[in-house]
Amino acid sequence: MFAPKAITFSALALILAVFIAAPVFVLHASPYMQPGQNWSVGMLAGGDLRLLDSGRYVHRSWCDICPNDMITHGTWRRSGDWLLLQPASTERPERRLRVVTIKGCPMLIPLQNGESPKWISHGTVYSREGDHCVIDLDMAGHTRKLLHDLQ
């Protein structure tokens, strides 16, 4: 009679432990559940960049007609006006993104062939999640001059 009560108690304790531990495990396993910022670039093709407060990052490249999304991850650090992304894979080079604020609009400008893009738009620079100011700058039609002033 004692054994069935012990088995029942052990089973209930195990179930309780799983319900307590599972959310904690998921919180640490998913980068989208950890503290950080989301940045995105592109319209028909682009990428989503998640910068975690821990110094790690996840980047998901996507396009509307591509069969698979490509996901890279690694560490990031800020060096002056640059955000440096160091992929975990040693086969991939470090990426450099220029951190700027133009007319109150924060953005990350990736180098393209070693140079800044000629135009600011959703397709060329990363904008922070929730900010729509990159669209407003693009509509203003004078972003080439704004980028030239950064040189």
Image: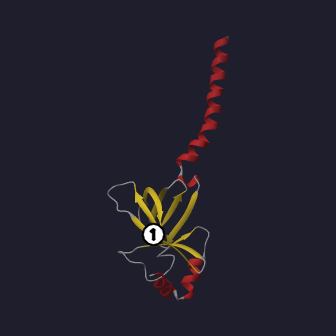
Q: Nearer the viewer, residue 83 or 13?
A: 83
The kind of secondary structure element at disc 1 is strand
Residue type marked 1: Leu
Q: Residue at x 48, y 68 (%)?
A: 80
Location of residue 30 in the rendering, given as x and y in whole percent from the top left corner = 54, 50
Q: Residue furthest front?
A: 80
Q: Is residue 65 visible?
A: no
Residue under numbered circle 1? 97
Left or right position of 90 against 63? left
Residue 118 screen position, x and y as percent: 43, 83
Residue shown at the point (50%, 63%) measured from the top left: 49
Q: In percent of the image, x 50 and y 64: which residue is there?
A: 48
Please tell me whether residue 49 is drawn above or below residue 99 in the rendered image.
above
Q: Residue at x 47, y 86 (%)?
A: 144
Quadrant containing the N terminus is top right
Tell me: 57 left or right of 11.
left
Q: On the picture, is 135 further left or further right than 61?
A: right
